[in-house]
Structure formats: structure tokens, C-alpha cells
Amino acid sequence: MAKILVKQVRSKINCPADQKKTLVALGLRRMGQVVEHDANPAILGMVNKVKHLVSVEETK
């Protein structure tokens, strides 16, 4: 399965609570933090929900 790197690039201040909880579920606690996840539909759906706050990079 493919892996993706998710990096938080924008602040979660003034975001709705559900978006804040999505960032926590992804494992992102602060700006600049990078986490690696499998590219499964659940993770991709969470990334899509907060796509304006994160950057995504595919790894091999």
C-alpha cells in the first residue's frame, strides 16, 4: 500500500471543532509536524477534509 506524508502548514485557530479533531486524529498537534500514513480511503477522506491546512506528499 502507498504511503503519504502529511504536514500541517496552516494554523487550526479559527477552524471548526470537527476540523481540529480531524487534525488530532491524523496525529498533527502543531504546525510543521509531519506524520506518515497509509493511503487508505479513511485517511484520504480525513486529509481531504482539512486540505486547506495540510500539504500531502506521496512516498514509495
Image (spheres, grey):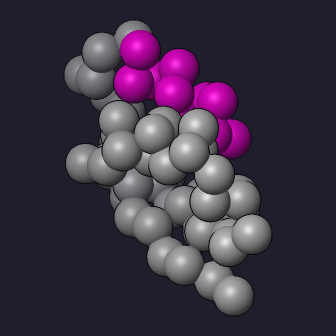
Asked if the stretch drawn in magenta spans residue 37, the answer is no
Look at 54% across and 61% down and name the residue there. 6
- Using the image, determine if residue 36 lies above or below residue 54: below
Q: Which residues are magenta?
A: 18-27
Instruction: Tell me where residue 58 appears, x and y as whole percent.
Output: 54, 78
Tell me the quarter of the image containing the N terminus.
Answer: bottom right
Look at 64% across and 30% down and name the residue there. 25
Question: Which of these two is toward me, 1 or 53?
Answer: 1
- Using the image, determine if residue 25 lies above or below residue 47: above
Asked if the stretch drawn in magenta spans residue 25, the answer is yes
Instruction: Tell me where residue 30 appears, x and y as whole percent.
Output: 56, 45
Residue lying furthest bottom: 60
Look at 68% across and 70% down and name the residue there. 3
Instruction: Tell me where residue 16 appears, x and y as whole percent.
Output: 30, 15
Do we see residue 33 in this rendering? yes
- Using the image, determine if residue 28 lies above or below residue 23: below
